[in-house]
Image (cartoon, grey):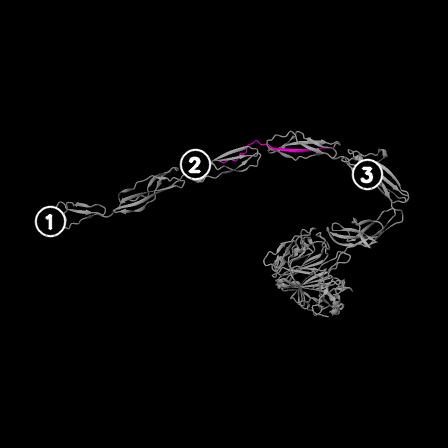
Amino acid sequence: MCFTNTLQSQTIDTGTSVHADFGIDGDVYDDQLSYWPLIEPPYVTQALGIDDWLDTEPDGNTATGAGIIDIFSPEALSAISGINSGQNNFAELRQSAPLYSTPEGDGRIWIDAAFYRDQYVAGSNQDATVFDQSINKNFDDPRAWELKVGDVPAKTDIIDVYAHLRRDFPITFQWAYIAASTSDADGSNHLDFEYFRKRIQLDGFNIVYENPTEEGLDCGHTTYKFGATGNVEEHGDILLSVDYKQGGREADITLLVWIDKNDFPTDADFDNFNTLGDRPFDFYDDGNGYVFAACTNSIEGDESNFGYARITLRQGISQVPVFSQLNNTGPTAAPPWGTIDSGGDQVFEYPTDTFVEFAINSTLLGFDTQSESGSCENPLGSVIVKSRSSASFTSSLKDMAGPFNLGDQPEIVVEVDDAEYECFETSATLTVTTVPPSSPPGVSYDYQWYEWNEATESWDIIPGAVNSTYEATVGTYMAEATIIRNGIAGCTAESNPATVTQGTQAEILVPSCPTNVNVDCEDDIATAFTAWMDNSGFSYTGGGGVVTEAYTYYLDDVEVALENFVAPNFCDGGVAKIRYTVSDECDQEEFCETTFTVAVDETDPTIADIDDYMLDGCNTAWPESLDTTWSDNCSDGGSITSDGGVDDGSDGCIQYRLYTFSVTDACGNDATETVRVSRMYDETDPTIADIDDYMLDGCNTAWPESLDTTWSDNCSDGGSITSDGGVDDGSDGCIQYRLYTFSVTDACGNDATETVRVSRMYDETDPTIADIDDYMLDGCNTAWPESLDTTWSDNCSDGGSITSDGGVDDGSDGCIQYRLYTFSVTDACGNDATETVRVSRMYDETDPTIADIDDYMLDGCNTAWPESLDTTWSDNCSDGGSITSDGGVDDGS
C-alpha cells in the first residue's frame, strides 16, 4: 500500500490527428489541419469535412466540417460583443447544435460543448479567479481553496478554454476534447483539466456545490464506486494533468480518478481489481506501489482516505486513448474576437506554445457513462481548468478558469397509457405523451413503435409505425421518441410498456369496397366503369352471425336505379358512387363507399407559345400570318394560323404588330395566344456633329493623326467617331491644308460623311534685312549715331522698318575710329536674321606742329626785312608740308 503525493506521468508525442471527425491539430478552425512542429510556415492544409472548435455552422452533412461552438445565435453574439474589444470580462459560449444531437447527419452525437474566456493579468488588469497561496494544491478539498483578485505570471495566465463531448459512429466510442490557451509560454506549460460529476459554482471566492448538503461530501469530490466484478456503479471525478516539455513536442499525461482508499486498503486490493473482468481501467503501480494522492485540508476534518489515484488503460487494450497537440513552432489563428497576449493586448493569433488540445477516448479509459438502454446520457457536471507553477503535481496552483457545466442531460419523459377496444372495433389508439411536449418548430419528436414478441422475449419493430399514435390490436407495445430540437435530432427515450386488450363481443364487421377510381377524357371510361362495378371488388370481414349485403347507386349524390347507373361523360364530368352496406346479427352495421369520378374537361387547349420576336434586318416586310401548333387534353390538336396582325404601336424606330391565335376544343374550352412581332424601321441617315475648319496653333505644327467627334442617329445610340488620317489638300503661300473625312453607317445601312479642312502655317525660311554699306561720318569728331534704320522682308510675314542696336566700339586705325551696329529680326514662325553695319569717323583733337626756326639777325645794316619766311609743319592725322609766314609786324626796338 502506497500513500504518496508524487505522481509520475506517461509521456506521449504531440502530433496532429483526427478522432471522430474532430481535428486535434493545435488550431481552432474547421475544414483545415495544422501540422506542428514544422521548420517553416505555412502549417495549415485544407481538410474538408473535419470539425473543430469554430467557424462554420453545422449544415446537416459531412462534406464540409463544422464549428462546435455557437458564434451565430443572438446569445452568442451578445457574449462575444463583451470581449470583442479586448475587455477583461468572463464569457461563456455553448454548443452550436442542440445537446445530444447529430447535426452533421452522420450518426455522430454531439453531446455538449463550451467555450470559456477567463480574465487576464496585464497592466492594471487583474484576474478574479487566482489561487491564494495558502491552500492551492490539486489534492486539496476544492471547497477549501481560496481564490482572490490578483496577478499570475503570463505563462500560467489561462485565457481561453474549450471543451466538447461527442459519441462516434458506427464505433460508438465516447470522446472528450479539451483545449486551453495561456497568454504566454516557454514550451513548458503545466495545466490541469478537472471534471466534476456534480455541478459546482463560485460563491464569492470559494467553490460550492449546487446541492451542498448531498454532493461533494467526499472531501469536496464525488467518489468512484465499483461493483463486485469491477463494474462502475457510480462515476466519480476525473483529473487530467498535462506538462509539455521538449519545446512542446512531448506531453506528460497523468490521469487520475477520485476514490475512497478504504475501498482499496492494500496494494493487493488494487492488484485484485486489475484482474476483474468488468473493470473500466487499471490502477497504476509505479514500482513503489499504487500511486495515490490523499486529500488534504478537508472542511469536514481529516478525510485522507479520499484522494486521487492514478489510472492507466486496461491491460490488453492496444489502442491509444489520449492524443495531444500544441502550436509549438509558430502562432495559430485565434477566434474572430481575438485572444490576449502577455502584454494584455488583444491579438488575433495564439502565440507559439500557448494553445494546447487533447482528445480522450473516454470509452477506452472507462469514463463512458452511456446506459445499457441506449437512452440519453449524463457524462459530467462541471469543468475547471487550472495552471501550475511547475511540472510537479504538488506544485502551487496559479490561475483557474471556470467552472462551467458540460454534459447536461435534456429531460425527456415518454409515456403510453394502456387501452382496450370493443369486439366490433379493430384496434385501440395508443398515444405517446412526452415531456417536454411537442411544440414545433422548436421541439418535435420522431417516433417508432415496438410490439413485444413473447416467443423471442424481445421487442419487434413495427414497420411504418412512426407517428405519435398507433392503432394497436391486442398485445403489449412500447414507443421510442427521439427529440428534434430546431430540426436537428437529439437523444432517444423509451416509454413504459402499454397493454392493449379487446372486449368479448363479436369481431368487428368491416366492409371493403373497391378502390376509388378517377378517370378523365384520356382514359377508356366505359371499360374502366365496367371493371369498377364488378361485385367481386366488394367484400367484408368480421361480424357476428349472418351478414347482409346491400348496394345503393348514386349519380352526383342522387340515388338512381341500377339500369340508369351509367358513367358520366367527360364534357360534363360527374361522380358515380356505390354504397356497400353490411349488417350482422350483433347490431353492427357498416358501409363503405367507392366512387367512379369522371373529371370534367375544363382545361383550355394549349397553343404552343411563340416568344415575341424581332424581324431580322431593317425595314423588313411584316409576315402575312404566323403558324404554330395547339394541343388539348381531350382533343387531337394540330396546326393553327394566326390572323394577319394589327399594328401595336412603336417605340422610337421599333414598330410592333400583334398577331393573335385562337382555338376552341370539343367541350367549348378555348384559348387565345398573341405574339408581338417587332421590326427596326429606319430610313434616316445618321448625323455627324460638325467640326468647323480650323488652323493649327503655332507654326510647322504636326498634322493630327485623326480627328474625333460624335455622331447621332434617330434609331441608334450614336457615340464617338474618329476620322481618317487626312489627305493633303493644297496650300496658299505659307498656309498648307489637309482634309479629314468622317464616315459612319447606322444599323440599317444609312450612312453619312463629313469633312474638316485643317490648315497650318508652314515656314522654315529666314527673313531678309535690307543691307546698308559700311560708311564714314562726315567731318571730324562727329558724334556717333544712336542707332541706324533700315527695312526687312519675309516670305510669309509683311516685313517693315527695323532699328539697330546702339552699336559697339569696333577698334580704330590711326585717327579713324569704328563702331559696329547690329540689326536682328525674327518672323512669326521663329525664323531669324542678323545684319551688321560698320560706321567710321575721323577723330582728332591734337594741334599740328610747325618746324621751329630760331630767332636770328639779318646780316648787314638796314637790311630790308624779308617779305616772309618759309618752314615745314607736321600733324598726327595730316601729311604736313611747307609753310610760309606772313609779312611780319614791328615788334619794338
Quarter of the figure with residue 695: top left
Q: Outermost residue, left direction?
A: 861
Q: Which residues are magenta?
A: 669-691
In the image, which disc is placed on residue 736?
2
**Residue 405 image position (x, y, % from top left):** 71, 59
Asked if the magenta segment contains residue 687, the reply would be yes
Q: Are marks 3 and 1 in contact (CB under 8 Å)?
A: no
Which of discs 1 and 2 lies nearer the camera? The answer is 2
Q: Amino acid at mark 2?
A: Gln
- Residue 500 vs residue 725: left or right? right
In the image, which disc is placed on residue 528?
none
Q: CA distance from mark 3 to mark 2?
A: 103 Å
Instruction: Using a 10 Å C-alpha cutoff, classify the residue at mark 3 as few (fewer than 14 neighbours), some (14 to 19) or many (20 or more).
Output: many
Question: Is any atom of residue 124 visible in this view?
Answer: no
Q: Amino acid at mark 1?
A: Leu
Q: CA distance from mark 1 to mark 2?
A: 97 Å
- Residue 489 vs residue 353: left or right? right
- Residue 204 vs residue 707: left or right? right
Instruction: Using a 10 Å C-alpha cutoff, classify the residue at mark 2 as few (fewer than 14 neighbours), some (14 to 19) or many (20 or more).
Output: some
Which of discs 3 and 2 lies nearer the camera? The answer is 3
Tell me the element at label 3: strand
Residue under pointer 3: 595
Residue under pointer 1: 858
Tell me the element at label 1: loop
Tell me the element at label 2: strand
Q: Earlier in the sequence, mark 3 or mark 2?
A: 3
Q: Are marks 3 and 2 in contact (CB under 8 Å)?
A: no
Point 67% across, 51% down: residue: 63
